[in-house]
Image (cartoon, rainbow, N blue to C red):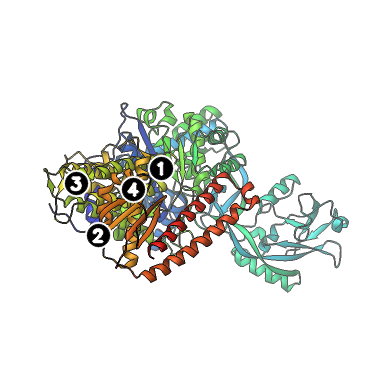
Amino acid sequence: MSFATKYNPEETESKWYAYWMEHKFFSSKVDHTKEPYTIVIPPPNVTGVLHMGHMLNNTIQDVLIRKARMEGKNACWVPGTDHASIATEAKVVSMLKERGIDKKSLTREEFLKYAWEWKEKYGGIILEQLKKLGASCDWDRTKFTMDPDLSEAVISVFVDLHKKGKIYRGIRMVNWDPQGKTALSDDEVITKEIQSKLYYIQYNIEGTENEFLTIATTRPETIMADVAICINPNDPRFAHLKGKKAIIPLINRAIPIIEDEYVDMEFGTGCLKVTPAHDINDYELGLKHKLEVIDILNDDGTLNEKAQILIGEDRFIARKRISKMLAEIGQMEKVEEYKSNVGHSERTNAIVEPKLSLQWFLSMEDITKPALQSVMDDIIQLHPPKFKNMYRSWMENVRDWCISRQLWWGHQIPAYYLPNGEYVVAQSKSEALEIANEKYGIAYKSEDLVQDEDVLDTWFSSWLWPISVFDAKVFSEGKKNEDLKYYYPTNDLVTAPEILFFWVARMIIAGYEYMGEKPFKNVYLTGIVRDKQGRKMSKSLGNSPDPLELIKIYGADGVRTGMLFSSPAGNDLPYDDKLVEQGRNFANKIWNAFRLVKGWEIDPELDGQENQAAIHWFENRFNESLTEIEDHFNKFRISDALMTSYKLVWDDFCSWYLEMIKPAYQQPIDAATYERTILFFEDILKILHPFMPFITEEIWQQIKERNTEDALIVSEWPSPKSFDVQTIAEAQQVFEVVSQIRNIRASKGISPKEAFELTIKTQQPDLYLRFEMVLKKLANLSKLEFGDQVANSLGFIVKSDECFIPMIGQVDVESEKENIQKELEYTRGFLNTVMKKLMNERFVSGAPAQVLEIERKKQADAEAKIKALEESLVNLG
């Protein structure tokens, strides 16, 4: 049977993905004879296309789900997408603009038709792209956060929480996105350090001719909204101004000078302007001192009529113009360069404005307590645990969640306003009408009720995700269906640290509020994929490769392993094309090993005794590695699990085992060794499959005859067996001897075909005799003897054993002596450095025992090497 010389990923990947789908290997149904293993996908935005962060995140999820499936668990990976209110509405508005349509000219219903049209066309792109990566999701379970049943669940939860008094409506200071024209929760604001300016503005004191106060501000465009100037009551510099008023420049409005210890006397000029409508701290100060609130900004960030000047001007243009106007009237004392931390909208990147607004809020004080406790008590474990402190800090200082958004795309808030100014919250308009009529004794008609225009924050739907994807009706009916009873709580969640509070914390809150228990057991937090300069990969920076192009070039298996080679949990991944190239090379190495093995002819007459040592060693080495791999998986060290697998396959199986058993050119192999090797190869394919699903399935199907249903994806995961540490250590010692002999050949330019005689001075000759056939074959030895040093030979040491190879006529003796002398001098110098440390009493008394042990080992190794080198010099005469 002939096999392709080169592995072809493109052809292989499409073939096996179709095969897995056709045989429903990804699908999962309730089966009480099996243990469920469940992952819900962090639903990507319907606006999204596959990026490097998705690649890393979904590769890890697929590794976990494929391993669980092979372990015989009922593996269920639920895919889906999020409607992403702000991002999607922006896309739809942009699409309409291209068609010459202004959103303002449309009714809500007309706009939503366009939004659904956009979603149907583009919303599923990212899920199709995940299939290229090999994601083994149960696609029949695909969910969308605005599916009818999931939408009904969101409305039920809103109604329930409002009934419990946990949702309320009120005027509060919120984060306002002037570009998206919507409120944002605190978590949707990204703080960035930007280069700014600090403006020192003079406020004249009322009733004086030349007296003024200087206020430093980064936002001169808000002076028209000032309602007071605040000084510290303990500041002697301003004691004479108590009870007086200051005049706002340009508009000449008088404002009181108030006192509060909130003012830091050492910061800036020691006094500050109070603008309650445009600063959260000023707002709190305003409440305390019962100050007026003047909001001078429109929803789009332009100045309104309350500003009195520059009406309709954009806030940043107004900043420049006001700065210039103040300078012209002599009330701009100076302007300094200044770096400040400024909030930006997570979705539109617009600079956020603090704004007083009538919004809907979820009270977070009590609802968060079980969610905090469960993580602190490790009922839910974060991996790595370093994120626990961050989680606790956020949960202990959480503010009420602003859940309303001034958008049309999303779940419309189920609040219905009545002609009398009151409102009713209900599951539907008809239900709201019944409640209103009963409550107020008035026969309202349907048209009398007007539903709230706003929609709910996108996260208000995705916080129900681990519940609603299995049973959306549980929120309205109060009883669990079979899916929810079986699959909930889910097992592992894989997500990015930046949505630990956006999403993870809120899912935990919802889990305890509605299910009375955790939504998942483990949260694996991935790092951020960064470029060589340490920058986060993004489309805007143009520093991110196209993931689909990478798959095309390097194969999905190469990309998957490349992403995982250096991505421990919670640590950022410094991406380099060399990583995925390494992944591709690994795939080629496995393919070449497969071709080698399948190219051997079998001779049933051969007994294969010479290969028993190799087989015994590799069996032990495999079980040692598998034990290590299981430990890594249990501790969510996915990258380490891959590296252990990589070393086992590349070094132990390919570089040593196959070389040990490989028959001579065009010679056959015995049947027993061949069959054992195929079994080893199958076990290797199993442990590699979660990482490299495509090439492993391809080889699995070709390595021997299979039934249609006998697929690697559902084969049994190998169980670690006991292993003999001594056998592994002895083989490693033999491999070191082989490596040293190969190095001597390479350094002296001696052909590998020229056989050597080897004499070993050792206390354990049985060790080498057990591996005699291996040694002779891999090192090309004509003779193996045991005894003392040999004249005219080159020597080396492995462990404490001295090895000698006669070199008569094969080397330049004088040149060799010179080389040995140089190495001897270097080793003596190294030993001298070690001895200085060990003779230093402070070092010896203060160093940990482990460190001392390492240094003493260095001493012993150096002394043994010096002895061998000196003997080599003697042998060379």
| Left or right of 637 on screen, residue 23 | left
Q: Which quarter shows the C terminus?
A: bottom left
**Which residue, given by chain and number where applicable, does mark 1 sit on?**
145
Q: Determine the image quadrant of residue 461.
A: top left
Identify the mark nearer the N-term, 4 or 2: 4
**Disc 2 and disc 3 in contact, CB within 8 angstroms:** no
Residue 757 appears in the picture as rendered: yes
Residue 392 x, y percent position in the rendering: 58, 40
Identify the mark nearer the N-term, 3 or 4: 4
Spatial CA distance of label 2 from label 1 is 71 Å
Q: Determine the image quadrant of residue 724.
A: top left
Q: Which residue is drawn at 27% across and 48% down?
A: 772
> In the depicted view, which residue is nearer to us: 422 or 90?
90
Spatial CA distance of label 3 from label 4 is 20 Å
Residue 346 x, y percent position in the rendering: 51, 54
Identify the mark nearer the N-term, 2 or 3: 3
Residue 717 x, y percent position in the rendering: 30, 38
10 Å neighbourhood of mark 3: few (<14), some, or many (≥20)?
some
**Which residue, given by chain and number where applicable, does mark 4 sit on?**
648
Spatial CA distance of label 4 from label 2 is 29 Å
User: Which amino acid type is shown beneath numbered disc 2?
Assistant: Ala
SS class, disc 3: helix
**Disc 2 and disc 1 in contact, CB within 8 angstroms:** no
> In the depicted view, which residue is nearer to us: 367 or 656?
656
**Disc 3 and disc 4 in contact, CB within 8 angstroms:** no
**Which residue, given by chain and number where applicable, does mark 2 sit on?**
755
Spatial CA distance of label 4 from label 1 is 43 Å
User: Which amino acid type is shown beneath numbered disc 3?
Assistant: Ile
**Which residue, given by chain and number where applicable, does mark 3 sit on?**
703
**Disc 4 and disc 1 in contact, CB within 8 angstroms:** no
